[in-house]
Amino acid sequence: MAEQHWTPTKALVDELCSCVGADNVSVNEPMAAHVTFRIGGPAAIMVSPHAVQEVAAVVRACRAAEAPLRVIGLGSDLLIADGGLACVVMCLAENFANVRVEGNRVVAQAGATNLAVAEAACAAGLAGYEFAEGIPGTIGGAAIMNAGAYVGDFSSVAMSLKCITPEGELVEVTREQAEWGYRHSMMADAGYVVVEATLELSPDAQADIRARMDDFHARRVEKQPLEMPSAGSTFKRPEGYFAGKLIQDAGLRGYKVGGAQVSEKHTGFVVNAGGATAADVRQLIADVQARVKERFGVELEPEVKMWGF
């Protein structure tokens, strides 16, 4: 059912409470508290499962009720409309964040942060996930969008995933089946919910791993507007170009719409400079796209996902 035509029922709320416990179900949950932009209206229902079987039960309950379902981690790549979301939002964050090391593998639940996984790997003397230490999201999100930075991306170290299908079944997805591409995966296309990822890493000296992580961190602090709310890189990298340079060369450094601004520090980022609404951000993104297309003939595609518009 399309979100705009859906309204929650008490029967569904009761069923979700039976799936995850009443303490883990919230009605009209303010989404600004759950996304890094710090913007967004309320979700009709939010659920926070703590086990794989609970995730599957939520998916089945929503399917049976024909309720639209969205999944959120830390909300680091999201812009949520000011009017909120007419759907069930399933949160997989700190409530679903166990990480364990098994030999040369790191197994992480979907809500584990990229930093937590990188730190666990470093502590175990396992190299390969250092690039993700500053990617401000979860393993689940990294798997869905094949997150990457600097010298690596998720697909380069992922061995397999456990996912819940839209029918509520638990399946394993191999590296080959995932069909990872640039900010893309089969799981995103198929509507799978990633619940666990297994990464295959390489032994290395802990000091060398730490040095690489520290280097990546220093580069981020120097170049990115980490002190301001944002959703990270706003646009995908257009083939043959860098989005930030196109935006800068179009004269848009510091450009503002309401409280939304093209970052002065890194023009590839749109930031909440104070009191921005989702409408401000959406209009600014459209303005940037139009100016870059006019000046350079390049279509900028947002990397930020926009929900509820």
Image (tube, rainbow, N blue to C red):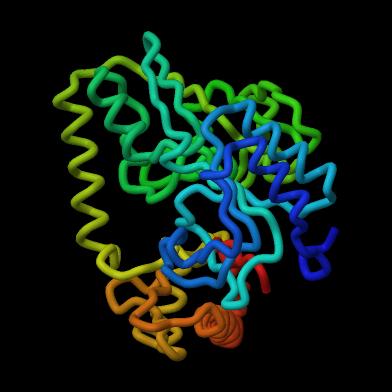
Q: Residue at x 36, y 28 (%)?
A: 128
Q: How many numbered marks appear?
A: 0
Most foreground residue, 86 or 100: 86
Whole-percent x, y for residue 28 in the image = 59, 64
Q: Residue at x 34, y 82 (%)?
A: 274
Q: Quadrant of the N terminus?
A: bottom right
Considering only vertical position in the picture, is 202 above or below 119? above
Q: Residue furthest top?
A: 103
Q: Quadrant of the C terminus?
A: bottom right
Residue 126, picture quadrant: top left
Q: Residue at x 51, y 35 (%)?
A: 110
Residue 289, picture quadrant: bottom right
Most foreground residue, 26 or 30: 26
Q: Residue at x 19, y 44 (%)?
A: 215
184 left or right of 154 in image: right
Whole-percent x, y for residue 44 in the image = 65, 62
Considering only vertical position in the picture, is 54 above or below 304? above
Most foreground residue, 243 or 255: 255
Considering only vertical position in the picture, is 275 above or below 171? below
Whole-percent x, y for residue 280 in the image = 51, 84
241 left or right of 301 in image: left
11 left or right of 305 in image: right
Most foreground residue, 187 or 238: 187
Whole-percent x, y for residue 134 in the image = 32, 47
